[in-house]
Image (cartoon, helix red, strand yellow):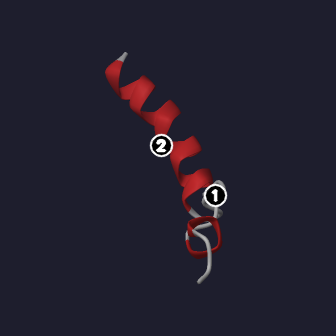
């Protein structure tokens, strides 16, 4: 049987979501301010 690490490998930074989150965070700060 494969080990849990093989079935569920350590999560890496999500490629598509990360840039969107980086852009969203400053926008939220501007909106809050």
31 versus 22 height, above or below? above
Foreground tag (1 vs 2): 1
The numbered dot on residue 10 is 1
Outermost residue to the top: 33
In whole angstroms, how far apart are the C-alphas of marks 1 and 2? 25 Å
Q: Position of residue 31 (x, y in %)?
A: 35, 27
Q: Secondary structure at mark 2?
A: helix
Residue found at x 47% / y 43%: 24
Q: Which residue is mark 2?
A: 24
20 versus 33 height, above or below? below
Q: Quadrant of residue 7?
A: bottom right
Residue contact between numbered discs 1 and 2, judged by CB atoms under 8 Å: no
Residue found at x 37% / y 15%: 33
Front-most of 10 and 16? 10
Outermost residue to the left: 32
Q: Position of residue 28 (x, y in %)?
A: 40, 32
Q: Quadrant of the N terminus?
A: bottom right
Label 1 crowd (10 A; few <14 / some 14-19 / many >=20): few
Outermost residue to the bottom: 1
Residue found at x 43% / y 24%: 29
Label 2 crowd (10 A; few <14 / some 14-19 / many >=20): few
16 versus 30 height, above or below? below
Front-most of 2 and 10? 2
22 versus 30 height, above or below? below
Q: Secondary structure at mark 1?
A: loop
Residue found at x 54% / y 53%: 20
Q: Position of residue 26 (x, y in %)?
A: 52, 31
């Amino acid at each position: 049987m494969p080990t849990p690490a093989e079935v569920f490998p350590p999560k890496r930074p999500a490629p598509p979501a990360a840039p969107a989150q980086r852009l969203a965070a400053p926008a939220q700060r501007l909106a809050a301010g």
